[in-house]
Image (cartoon, helix red, strand yellow):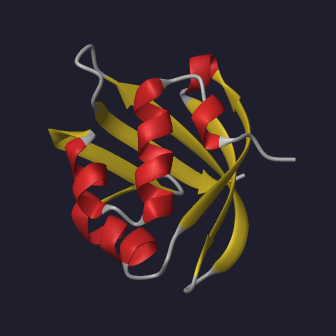
Amino acid sequence: MSIQVNRLGDPAVRAFVTAVNAHDKAAFEALLTPDATMSDDGTDRDLAEWADREIFSSNGHMDVESESAGGRTLLVGYRNDTWGEMRTKWYFTVEDDGRISRFETGQA
């Protein structure tokens, strides 16, 4: 059972999932601070390169199974054309201005 995106608790995370699922790169980039960082399975990656490869050029899609930490931690069924589907965990750091300065993802 998944959670409808519009019911996610944190507005920035809700907008992030919406942008990913719509493949809206401009909306995705607008949600991030200029110096935003990310990691995948514990290794820091180049955010722009990673997002292009793992989300935008491979039809990435987030199916949120559960949320915690006020909506800033998600358990997600993530799929893309490269890797297929896998269960992943996502952690978001949201700044006071409502933009995301860091996200971490990895297999759950």
Q: How many marks?
A: 0
- Residue 64 vs residue 35, the one in the foreground: 64
Residue 55 visible at all: yes
Spot the residue most to the right. 1
Query: Relative to residue 72, is residue 46 drawn left or right?
Result: left
Residue 46 visible at all: no
Q: Residue at 44% of width from left, 72% of height from top? A: 54
In this view, 30 is above or below 59 = above
Q: Residue at 49% of width from left, 77% of height from top? A: 59
Coordinates of residue 14 in the picture (x, y in percent): 50, 36
In this view, 63 is above or below 37 = below
In this view, 49 is above or below 22 = below
Query: Relative to residue 97, is residue 84 drawn left or right?
Result: right
- Residue 60 vs residue 47, the one in the foreground: 60
Q: Residue at 49% of width from left, 52% of height from top? A: 42
Spot the residue most to the bottom. 82
Coordinates of residue 17 in the picture (x, y in percent): 50, 48
* Occupied quadrant, residue 48: bottom left
* Occupied quadrant, residue 35: top left
Coordinates of residue 32 in the picture (x, y in percent): 24, 41
